Image (cartoon, rainbow, N blue to C red):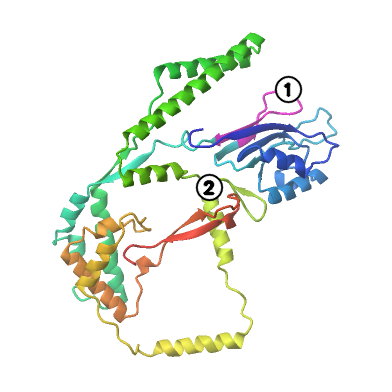
Amino acid sequence: MAGHGILILVSVYRPPKKELLRSDLKVLFTLEDAVILFGDLNSKNTTCNCNCSNRNGSKLVDLAGNLHFNIVTPPTPTHNPFNDNHRSDVLDIALMKGVALRLSCIETLQCLNSDHRPVLIRLGSLAGDCPPLNKTVTNWQKVFTVLQKIDIPILNNIPNDIVSTDDIDHAIGALINHIRTVVDNSSWVVPVNSDRKELPRHVSELIRAENAALRRAGTYPTCENRSHARDLQRKVKGHMEEVRKENSSDLIEGISPSHQTYWGLAKALKTEGPVPVPALRKPEKSTAFDDREKAECLADNIEHQCSENPPYDLEHVRRVEEEVRHRVSHPPKDDLDPITHDDISKHIKDLKIRKAPSMDSISSKALKCFSAPLVALLVGIFNVCIKNCYFLTACKEAVVIGIPKPRKPHDLPASYRPISLLSTLGK
């Protein structure tokens, strides 16, 4: 599982007449940051696809909220008793905590003549199940050259005198479409080259031999096969440690002696890299695994936080709203100075090119390629907006992403701080 940390998988069993203890689960989940407990806990709850609930099942659901782990159950029964008087039910379940892998499926396999059916769980790796990583390369010199052209059909449809709010929306929409078309036509997608060094040939051959020995020991678990597999595991571990030390030495020797290089190296070593959002626990005790479900879960949490409080004094609210309507009905007393060409040019020059774009996909780098006529068009649009006290409709939308809060459980929607990516034109 490339890109994922250590994952501990524990096979568990709890006899039916024994009590489920919080201390046992707490100790098991402290084995590592990412732990999966899989087995028969004899803990049934109707929220876990079971036909009925028992004491330990109710206790397990409560512990899931206190210890911050997810309960994953198959949709069909895993226990089919030989006694016809007993009902089939779900007994074999998985408890997951800190696992940042996509759950593809969990299903019961009908392939063994046993009262307990095997359960298959598929976890998508961070990179293995995903298509090859690509990046978009843009020829910004070509973008700059095309944006210098004046006779553009889509821009020629913009009226010379922008007066109404409809004219504003039409003009800004045509401008956004033109910029997006130019950037798309000047961009292409290429695969991301991995900067990871290939392993030496003798180490790769040793790893293949180790895998073959492990498969042989699993099929024929004799003392000789197990001893041979363990010996190869020790050899692979030693060789991999030597390779890491050699790569670190080559990196230190190859960097140039400058403050920027040392700062970049320190930043790279401290940066953990992007980590996918784990499965999120919903308020109704269910779990969101799919990306769309996670997005809806985060959106519901933001909506709950930003919901209006019930008014306590309706008369006071009425007076405030009436005063606001009265003030808005009068023309503004202090007229703002009109925006000039130099104001827009200076603001575009000060934009940071590493800022992420919003829904319109227009980056700060694209605005820096503007010609003088395009800047003049922006000046006219913004001046009409100020005159009409109008805010651009295209700039009212934002892309909201969730940044995990430090030292908070990442499986709770409330542990993510919403960050809005605003339109570059709206700034």
Give the residue pinned by disc 2: 277
Give the residue pinned by disc 1: 113
Q: Secondary structure at mark 1?
A: loop
The structure residue drawn at horizontal position 50% and vertical position 59%, both measured from the top left corner, is: 418
Question: Residue 180: image x %, image y %?
Answer: 28, 55
The structure residue drawn at horizontal position 36% and vertical position 73%, both measured from the top left corner, is: 391
Q: Give the left or right position of residue 242, taking residue 25 as reference.
A: left
> Mark 2 Cα within 10 Å, few/some/many (few <14, many 20+)?
many
Question: Residue 370: image x %, image y %?
Answer: 20, 61
Q: How many labels sit on residues?
A: 2
Q: Which picture quadrant has residue 380?
A: bottom left
Q: Say if mark 1 contacts mark 2, CB within 8 Å.
A: no
Q: Which picture quadrant has residue 349?
A: bottom left
Magenta segment? 106-123
Please state, as top left, top right, bottom left or bottom right, where the C terminus lies in the image.
bottom left
Hey, what amino acid is under mark 1? Asn
Q: Secondary structure at mark 2?
A: loop
Q: Earlier in the sequence, mark 1 or mark 2?
A: 1
In the rendered image, the vertical position of residue 13 relative to residue 175, given as above or below: above
Question: Residue 12: image x %, image y %?
Answer: 73, 33
Residue 120 lies in the magenta-colored region: yes
Question: Residue 171: image x %, image y %?
Answer: 26, 68
